[in-house]
Amino acid sequence: MSNAHGMDTDCMTITRFLINEQRKCKQATGALTILLNQLMTAIKAIASAVKRAGIANLYGIAGTANTSGDEQKKLDVLANDLFVNMLRSSGQTALLVSEENETVIEVEVANQGKYIVTFDPLDGSSNIDCLVSIGSIFGIYEKKSSGAPGEGDALRPGNELVASGYALYGAGCMVVLTTGCGVNGFTLDPNLGDFVLTHPTMNIKERGKIYSINEGYALYWDAGMKKYIDSVKFPEDSKKAPYSARYIGSMVADVHRTILYGGIFLYPGNSKSPNGKLRLLYEGNPMAFIVEQAGGSASTGTGRILDVVPQNIHERVPVILGSKADVADCLAAIAK
């Protein structure tokens, strides 16, 4: 609803949306809504820092490496601190798993709640200095054990997620979220200082026209992957147009485009890295949950990503996700 001044006086903010969803669940206590609101605070602060990075001297290397062996950027450290502090202080979390921390982070007993949050605070940070879109990814589980929280509480398959989402920092800031009842997108309105529903009920096309993969690793792909990529680049049917190649190198940006336009995103295993590069708990699972909720598919190449039971918190997993028909074509090529 807009008034004469062109302002929506009845906008659907993310908090309002979550409260409406909460009312639909009789067992809801509001704890998840509080937790997600704290996450939104961290995301808004990161979005602000990304915009100010050059002026505030936040570009460049922090001088340390994360669990993946990647050099940490200054914004990596800032984003991680924001996520950890906001989640710890929410009163709703028991355990945190971050790409930037080698071990799990146990929340102080006085602040403990019932949720476990896994997150990559700044995905695609190698692109920071050249102003390419970057993002944050998170997944939320409910703690099942009755004792003190430990690493075992986080080693859960993605099919047990209660919510997941990602934030994209680019021309604007957008959050895409699922609580297991479809996928919705919210854009940060700088005038309101809040996220507003702009992409309700996001659904991925059955088939797209874009493939997204780092072809620099083609030398190390297996025969099935090479065959599939060749099939979309050089279709046997002369009436079919080849797929367009799009690869940003930031998982959030590449997956977001795939959800909006359809197609397929791949970071498969290869002869050098049999399990690929992406991490299961805070990259593969949250994104797979979102894509499936949007009507797509997400596979390791041999099975459903969400069914993989992790053995350690930084476990890697091959990722093939996107439009159902495209993923099916890829799996068929791999299986031959």
Image (cartoon, rainbow, N blue to C red):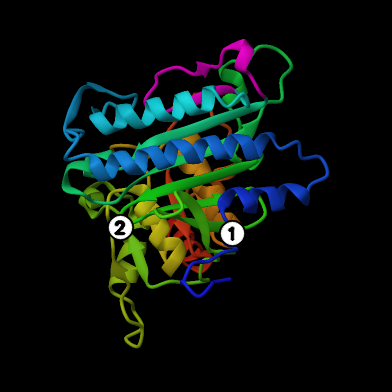
Magenta run includes residue 230: no
- The residue range painted magenta reads 94-113
Q: Which of 19 and 179 is in front in this view?
A: 19
At x 33%, y 55%, the residue is 223
At x 73%, y 47%, the residue is 22
Visible residue check, residue 209: yes
| Lower position in the chain sequence, tag 2 or tag 1 | 1
Give above or below for 146 relative to 44. above
Q: Nearer the viewer, residue 21 or 220?
A: 21
Disc 2 residue type (three-letter): Ala
Please rate how many residues cluster around mark 1, counting C-alpha atoms within 10 Å: few if below 14, some from 14 to 19, many from 20. some
Give above or below for 243 relative to 315. below
Identify the secondary structure beneath mark 1: loop
Q: Residue 125: x and y, percent?
A: 27, 39
Say which residue label 2 marks.
171
Say which residue label 1 marks.
12
Q: Residue 104: x and y, percent?
A: 49, 18
Give above or below for 93 relative to 149. below
At x 50%, y 34%, the residue is 281
